[in-house]
Image (cartoon, rainbow, N blue to C red):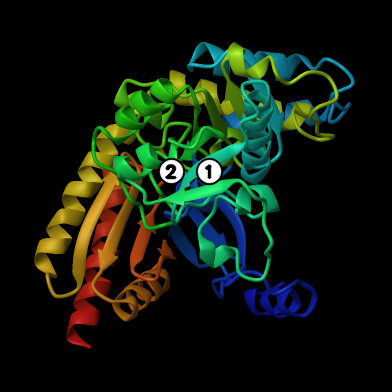
Amino acid sequence: MSSEETIAESGEYLMNTYGRYPIALARGKGCRVWDEDGKEYLDFITGIAVNNLGHCHPNIVRAVTGQCKTLMQVSNLFHVEKQAELARLLVENSFADKVFFCNSGTEANEGAIKLARKWGGANGGRYKIVHARDSFHGRTLGALSATNKKYQAGFKPLLPGFKAVPYGKIEPIEKALSDEKVCAVLLEPIQGENGVVIPYENYLRDVRRLTRKKKVLLMLDEIQVGMGRTGKLFAYEHYGIEPDIMTLAKALGGGIPCGAFLATDRVARHFTPGVHGTTLGGNPIAMSAGLAVIRTIMEDGLLDRAASSGAYFLERLAAIKEAHPGLVKDVRGKGLILGVEFKSPGIAKDAVSRAVGKGLLTILTEQRVMRLLPPLIAGEKEIDEAIEIIGETLGEAGNA
C-alpha cells in the first residue's frame, strides 16, 4: 500500500490514541528508515529509545530468526535456557541478584511497585511510594498513579498511597520520608518524557543516602535511559550508587517486546511462587533478542561510543543555541538522550515539523522540547547530518 492508503486505513480501524506523524514506515536499516513511498529518514526517535542498535541489527535478526525455528513460547511453567542466560548477564553486569521478565515498561513498573509493597508489608506494614512530579512510569493504573497528572485525567480514582514531590530537589523527599508508612522512592535518573530533565549531579546520591537512613527502598526506572543510552550500561552507574530495584524495557529487547525488573536478594526473596506472574514474559524469542542486545553493546564498544557521540552532539547543539538565541532556550543531555528546549511551543512544534519534512525524525515533548534519541551506533556523520537539518529548520523559522 501507499503511505496515504495505510494512513487512511489506520484512521478507519484503529482507536484514536496516538498523535501520529503523517508517515507510514515500511523498512529500516541502521540509523535510517524508509516510508511506503520510498522517502528516507534519519531516525533519531529509534522507536522511543527502543532500537539502541539501530534497525534490523544483524545480531538481533540472526538471534530472533534462529530462535523462531526451534522454540517460540512455552510459558513460565518450565525452565527456559535463554531466560536463565539473560538473567545471569543482567545480574553479572548490575547491582542485582534476581530478575523477573515481563513484556513492557509499564509491566516492569507494575511488578516493581508490587515487590516494593510486598517488602514493605513484611517490614512494618509500609505501602506508600514517593515519586517525582511530572515523571512517566506507564499507563496502567498502578504505574499511572506515579505518573504525570496530565496522563491521569479521566482515570481516577487511582491507586492510593502515592506521594508526588518535585523532581531534582532533596528537601521534599526528606520531608516525605518522615511518614513511616513509606516503603520506597521511585525515580527516573533522567526524566525523558518530561523534556530530558537532568537533576543536579549529587541528586541520586543524596536520595540514596536518605533512603538508607530511613530504611526504605530506592527504585530506579531505567526503561528509557538504561541499556547504554547514557554511555553506561545503566544510568545509576554514573553516580556511584546502587538501587534496590531497577526497571528495564524498551532497548532491552532491541525491538522485540521485553521488560524486566531487577532486585537485590533481600528484596526479591519476598516474591514467592504464586504472588506474581506473566504468560508471555521471558519467552525464548524476547530472551534471544535481549542476549543479542546486551552482548553487542558490551562487545562492540557501544558504551564508549554513546558517551563520545553524545558529547560531540551536545557540543554541536550548543553551537546551534548560540547561533539562534532568539529561538533556543537550552540544550542538554547525557550520552545519547538529548533535548533542545525552545522559547515557545510554537517554535518547537514548527522546528520538529520542519525537521521531519527534511528527513530527520525527532520527538516533540512537553510542548517545548525536541527530544533526540539516536541509536548507539550513530557516529559523527549522522550527527552532523542531523545538526545540518536542525540548523536549516531554525534558519527558516528565524526568517519566517
Residue that badge 2 annotates: 375
Quarter of the image for residue 396 reads bottom left
Determine contact: label 1, label 2, CB under 8 Å. yes
Q: Is residue 50 above or below residue 97?
A: below
Residue 88, given in percent of the width and then of the height, sits at 61, 12
Residue that badge 1 annotates: 51
* CA separation in Å, label 1 and label 2: 6 Å
Q: Is residue 212 above or below residue 147?
A: above
* Residue at 53% across, 29% down: 246
Q: Provide the secondary structure element on which disc 2 rests.
A: loop
* Residue at 72% across, 18% down: 82
Residue 56, given in percent of the width and then of the height, sits at 58, 42
Q: Looking at this view, is 51 or 98 the one in front?
A: 98
- Asked whether residue 345 is in view, the answer is yes
Residue 273, given in percent of the width and then of the height, sits at 83, 19
Quarter of the figure with the C terminus: bottom left
Q: Looking at this view, is 214 or 266 the one in front?
A: 214
- Asked whether residue 361 is in view, the answer is no
